[in-house]
Image: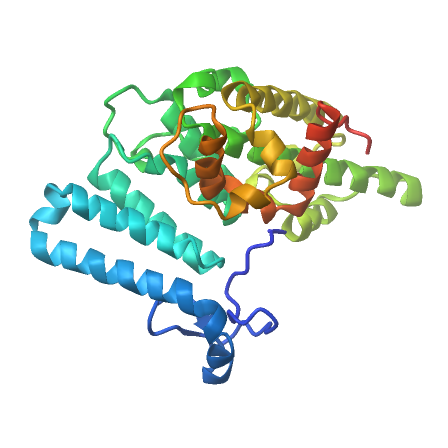
Amino acid sequence: MNLGLPWQKCNLPECLVRERLLRCGACGIALYCGAEHQKADRLRHKASCGLVKQTREKLREEKTAAGELWQRAPTSSCILAHFDAMLAALNIRTGEAVDAALAHAFTMLRLAPLDKSGVHGYVPPMYLRLGRDQAAYDFVKWWAVAEPGDDRGWHDTALAGDDVLEPLQVLTRLKGMVQLSMIISMVLLKMRLMLDLMGLQALRNLALEKAGRLPTMEEKMGFVKEEAMSDVLLSRPDVVGRADFEDVIEDLVCQVKMLFTFVQERNQHFWQAILKPEPYANAEPTACILGSKEEVNLLFRQCWYSWSETEPAITTIRDMIRKGRVPANNR
């Protein structure tokens, strides 16, 4: 996937080594090609490393104190320890760190299915950061359509692999029934798929112009594997195999516009913050009123990296915010 999150590489930014990597002994997340680069990266990594180590030790203490009961009747302090460990892992901007944070999130959802801590709002953005757009969609749809009090784990449902291109009306409960971060994630998910299809349409038009033919399925799948931001099309040969993508693109444009409006109605400050993220990107979330600027701090904690690591999408959404509309398909 064509995303900006480093994965399976040495944690020293300028090093591109991806083989024979060793984990940091303190945090257990950061990877290094050797002691020399781990030492060189120590000053940058130290704060986040110490925080992860601290939260892991706290979680271990909670589990030890609770004994075998912690999985059957977890205490609020144990759930909080998982939550802190999740946030600490997200301070390290690598795929391995997001994967570790996602594991903490699902442990919390398994132990406390009603999720009073609101951890489900963090899950779709984490999936998107990992390029797992299909899983993000499945999770949001399950949360949107599940009946109140449904304590099934989402993997127990039949929604896995659902149709990301289905009409948005299927998710009408999105507008007011789920955390705003999930709607924001749906905007990004639909936009990434829209941009991927625009890329395929451009490939089609170029092949017709230069060679007088449509691109082969092999050529189109090569584009999807190398250039796509979303994993959705990897399992949709029925879509990739189309001769033309204009109608699918137009439908996604309409869906993005509708979701964009949903977000604007819930919090009029969020999209403006995307234009000028500096005050929010590093702010600590505090108690807030829904729809307030303070809520944006929480939303950025949940969603910002998923946007900032998808450069084509954030460029498109900023253009859309400035113009007050969704850009038309001009490819």
Q: Nearer the viewer, residue 43 or 150?
A: 43
Is 46 rendered above or below residue 258?
Answer: below
Q: Position of residue 249 (x, y in %)?
A: 70, 27
Horizontally, residue 47 falls left or right of residue 273, namely: left
Q: Identify the residue at image location x=49%, y=34%.
A: 296
Q: Position of residue 52 (x, y in %)?
A: 34, 61
For the C terminus, give its image quadrant: top right
Q: Position of residue 170 (x, y in %)?
A: 48, 17
Q: How many marks?
A: 0
Horizontally, residue 171 falls left or right of residue 50, namely: right
Q: Is residue 331 visible?
A: yes
Q: Nearer the viewer, residue 213 or 136?
A: 136
Q: Position of residue 102 (x, y in %)?
A: 37, 48
Quadrant in which residue 188 is drawn: top right
Q: Nearer the viewer, residue 268 or 108?
A: 268
Q: Identify the residue at image location x=14%, y=55%.
A: 63
How is the rendered protein coloured?
A: rainbow
Quadrant in which residue 235 is drawn: top right
Q: Is residue 135 visible?
A: no
Q: Identify the residue at image location x=41%, y=62%.
A: 48
| Residue projecting furthest to the bottom | 36
